[in-house]
């Protein structure tokens, strides 16, 4: 049952990554000039991070670990159990922070930082997270 939920969540993340890659402007100027694409990219960033957090919680539940009280702590738990690397846990925690800024519109956004996070970092980190979760599941068998 839980393996099906994990696989469904991985497919969801991969779908979001594919959709993001189809709309992502080629450069920062294109990102700034197309408000609809900019908003869509930011929304995909939010959705990808949300799905990664969901997957983290499913993996934690699968290991019968203590459920974290806040989302960011899920990455610390997976790091502590050596499911994901220290560096990935840190980057995902940072991405969660950026997601909160985008979702809740805290203060002024640095568009270039958001663009680079959406274009480069979230894709790399999401794919690495999936690889590490899949490796964990294979090793567990």
Image: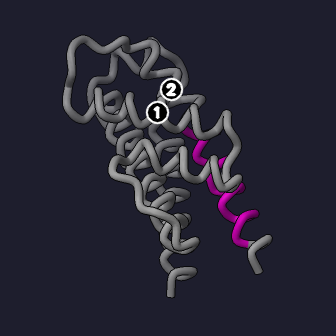
**Would you say 38 lies left or right of 116 here?**
left
For the residue pair 141 and 66, the one nearer the viewer reads as 66
Element marked by disc 1: helix
**Magenta span of residues:** 122-137
Q: Residue at x 34, y 16 (%)?
A: 33
Is residue 19 magenta-colored?
A: no
Q: CA distance from mark 2 to mark 1?
A: 8 Å
Circle 2/circle 1 CB separation < 8 Å: yes
Quick check: 1 above or below 60?
below
Judged left or right of residue 5, residue 106 is: left
Does 134 lie within the magenta span?
Answer: yes
In front of the other: 85 or 17: 85
Rendered view: 26 above or below 70? above
Give x and y (percent) for residue 137: 70, 71
Image mark for residue 95: 1
Q: Position of residue 7 (x, y in %)?
A: 56, 73
* Quadrant of the rendering where the C terminus is positioned: bottom right
- Which residue sits at x=42%, y=21%? 114
Main secondary structure of the magenta stretch: helix
| Residue density around tag 2, few if under 14, some if 14–19, many if 20 or more, within 10 Å | some
First in sequence: mark 2 or mark 1? Answer: 1
Residue at figure coordinates x 21%, y 14% from the top left:
107
Pointer 2 residue: 117
Badge 2 element? helix
Classify 10 Å Cα crowding around label 1: few (below 14), some (14-19), many (20 and above).
many
Please tell me in which quadrant of the rendered image residue 96 appears.
top left
């Amino acid at each position: 049952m839980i393996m099906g939920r994990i696989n469904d969540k991985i497919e969801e993340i991969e779908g979001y990554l594919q959709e993001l890659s189809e709309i992502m402007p080629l450069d920062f100027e294109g990102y700034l000039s197309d408000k609809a694409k900019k908003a869509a990219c930011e929304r995909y960033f939010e959705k990808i991070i949300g799905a990664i957090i969901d997957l983290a919680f499913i993996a934690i539940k699968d290991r019968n670990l203590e459920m974290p009280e806040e989302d960011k702590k899920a990455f610390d738990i997976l790091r502590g159990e050596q499911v994901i690397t220290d560096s990935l846990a840190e980057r995902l925690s940072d991405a969660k922070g950026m997601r909160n800024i985008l979702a809740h519109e805290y203060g002024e956004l640095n568009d270039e930082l958001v663009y680079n996070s959406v274009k480069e970092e979230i894709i790399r980190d999401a794919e690495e997270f999936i690889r590490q979760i899949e490796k964990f599941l294979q090793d567990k068998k």
